[in-house]
Amino acid sequence: MRAEIGPDMPRAELADLVQKLTDQMMGAARDLQFELAADRPGMMGSAIIAGKATDLIDAGFFLTQAYKDWFGSSARDAYEEEKAHKVLLVDDSPFFRNLLTPLLTVAGYQVTTVQSADEARAVRVQFLATNAAGMQWQFGPQADQISVHPGATQEIRFVAYNPTDKPMTAQAIPSVSPSRAAAYFHKTECFCFTQQVLQPGERIEMPVRFIVDRDLPADVHHLTLAYTLFDITSRQPPVAVNAASAPAKESLQ
């Protein structure tokens, strides 16, 4: 069922829409166990839905607030607005998001709408880069940190530059902190999977693609992905490329 709600909507259509919505909500609510505790205007109380405690909104209250000229005055008009509360509206139905958002906004709430719980959760991922002793490369991430949603694929690039006059081989070793969150950080592509060889003056951008698992503990809001870059030239000597036949190199300088 779809409908556009606005000030030009005929009163009869609005009343019919409200009745249909009420019937749907009542049908869905038959098996719910309610605990009414209306300590705030516009909130009916709470119910257990899918095993979770859920606040129940009194849609009728917000309709009278949003369309006073249609519904007439109400005893609730005497309600003194409290300091604006923030409401996170999670619903995969655009219809219900579009229905409730203007009603809650008119009632003084700051509304944020998302389609899923994953979209509602943001995790800050910080990136660090360190050279091991003896490593002369310039090495670091293109961004210090980004905000990600669990379950979504993300990409960050690290830049490496060989300022020396000789080819070198390097190996990056990653770590994730806090350590208990490492199992929930999945790299699908990483320059640390292979050794990196740079010719003199060569600069490369190295992508890291990763996913923060949806099962990341709820109390973890910040992750750090750190790399330490080691010079392994003595163990894995690179092949020098003749300057005349080598492709053009991009320098940081």
Image: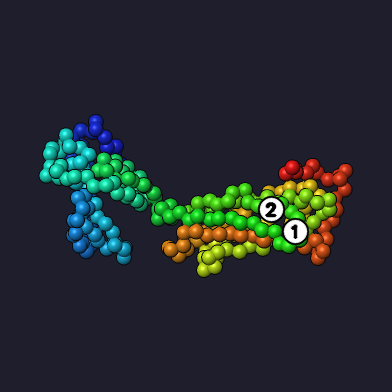
The three-letter amino acid code for the residue at tag 1 is Met
Is residue 206 in view from this perspective? no
The correct choice, above or below, for 118 with respect to 2 in the image is below
Q: Secondary structure at mark 2?
A: strand
**Residue at the location (80% across, 44% down)?**
247
Task: State left or right for residue 147 relative to residue 141.
Answer: left
Task: Please identify the quadrant where the N terminus is shown.
Answer: top left
x and y percentages locating residue 9 in the rendered image = 23, 33
- What residue is pinned by disc 2? 139
- What residue is pinned by disc 1? 135
Contact (Cβ within 8 Å) of mark 2 with mark 1: yes
**Residue at the location (18% across, 56% down)?**
38
Q: Nearer the viewer, residue 25 or 184?
A: 184
The correct choice, above or below, for 9 with respect to 26 in the image is above
Disc 2 from disc 1: Cα separation:
10 Å
**Residue at the location (69% across, 53% down)?**
139
Location of residue 190 (image quadrant): bottom right
**Residue at the location (12% across, 39% down)?**
73
Is residue 114 in view from this perspective? yes
Which label belongs to residue 244?
A: none
* Badge 2 density bin: few <14, some 14–19, many ≥20, Cα 10 Å: many
The three-letter amino acid code for the residue at tag 2 is Phe
